Amino acid sequence: MKPIQGERSRQSSIHPRSGTFCARSPAARVGRLMVVGLLALTAPLTGCANRAATPPTLADLPSAWSNPGVASTATTLPAGPWWRTFGNPRLDTLEERALASHPDIQAAKARLNQAEIRARMAESPLFPTLALSGSDQLSAQGSSGKSVRASQASLNASYELDYRGRNLALIDKAQAESTASRMDREAVHWSLTADLASAYLRLLTLDHRRELARQSQETAQRILEFTAKQVAFGQTAPLDEARQKQTVATIEAQNAALDLQRAQARDALAMLANQPLSAIREIGGKLADWRIPEVPAGVPSDLLRRRPDIRRAEADLVASQADLAATRAALFPTLELTGEGGYASKGLKELISPGNLLWKLGAAVTVNLFDRGKQRDAISVAEEAQKAAVAAYQKAILSALKDVEDNLAAIHWLTEQEKAQQLAEAASREALRLAEVRYRAGAVDFMSVLDAQRSLLQIHDELPQTRQARLNAAIGLFKALGGPIPQAEEPLAKPGG
């Protein structure tokens, strides 16, 4: 049976090509024309909504390092963790324990998991939302007490058309923030391993300085005993004995200060390694166990892909670009499609019945007509945030270049300084031996012995500190070069519109 003309004007159907709901009533046609008109009016603003800046190009990066200190012609860092290049198994053990259990590592991992979950959550608007609802109500009105029962069950669906790319931009922002969190985790790994190596090196240096001071104390005590005998026999003045007692006391005070520094260094190492003090006392080791590695510095452009702080700044820049694109897209009307299907009846028994079927389809357009410039101000805020991200990215690169240059210079000049101090130490040791022999023979006065002692004591304390500084420069160069980081690198999320 064909429907009458009046019924035909109220019917609806599915468009044969697009599959979208098409209403045939005059009111629906007017509404559809309004939606199309609004979209047409906003179409010329497309470029404003999705135009995002690209990362700045740094064409002025140097092609090579200006400071000396590259000990190898290789251009790539060695495979595996960088600390193994020092050839110290005890250091390897400490690093592995710290990476496995340190609270900073665990906290950074948890923050990364949060960021990855938020990135997944940002993808939700790309899909329709579905909700299932049901109700069963019993109501009565008036004195008759007659009740009316109403039951309903329906499935609701809604979907926002992201025709301006706002949701895609928000996804890009969330993915860039996830990348930033991943780089934060790498930065924690990066700093912790370098700080731990420096702390262990400091402890061993203090041990070595304490041993040299003990040797100096034994020598000074031996000279004091000889001087006391000379005073007893009347062959030298009591002033010489008093001066030597002062030298012995000075060395004892220096040893006490070294013992305090050693205790503090041990505590710091225990905290960084996340180990009890008893385990640190048993770790042992000597300063001579450390091998000074060759550190291939490569070329400056390598820093852009290796250092986690630079990659973090780059991820922040990408996030700011995506946020700007999303903020611009918020200027445009939102178009939401809704649908509902289900059953409604006067009782639960007959609820699911063809005669009780209900359904609704609709579209809603929301246009912001006046907000006193709030959206425009939001765009200005996003633009300024992007400028700040560009500046931070450039500063991170300049800071990285400085770190590498400083450590290259330190490696070179500390090597020269250590060579000179080794010659000075050998000369001071021989000078003390000769001064003591000539003093015993009565050829020189006691001041020659005192001067030789003080010179040897000073160089004994400076030489291990120079070796510590030289090894710390190698540690600092590995850190400045950003690796090697065991985790695989992943590409950054780029703005999608």
Image: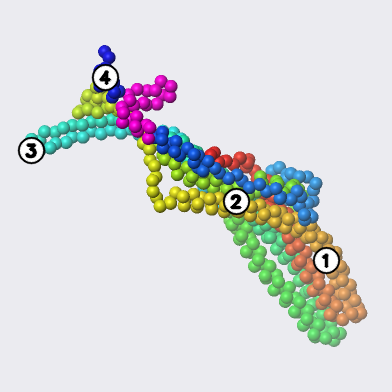
Amino acid on which the number 1 mark rests in the picture: Glu
Label 3 sits on residue: 143
Mark 2 to mark 3 CA distance (whole Å):
75 Å
Query: Which comes before the other along the chain, label 1 or label 3?
Result: 3
Type of the residue with mark 3: Ser
**Closer mark to the observer between disc 2 and disc 4:** 4
Query: Can you identify the residue that label 2 sits on?
Result: 390
Question: Residue 495: x, y in percent?
Answer: 55, 41
Image point 74% across, 44% down: which residue? 76
Mark 4 or 1, closer to the camera:
4
Is disc 3 placed on a helix, strand or loop? loop
Q: Amino acid at mark 4?
A: Gln
Residue toward you, 89 or 473:
473
| Magenta range | 12-34
Q: CA distance from mark 1 to mark 3?
A: 113 Å
Mark-to-mark CA distance, 4 and 1:
113 Å
In three-dimensional space, the C-alpha distance between marks 1 and 2, rounded to whole angstroms, equals: 51 Å
Which of the numbered marks, if any, corresponds to residue 223? none
SS type, badge 2:
helix
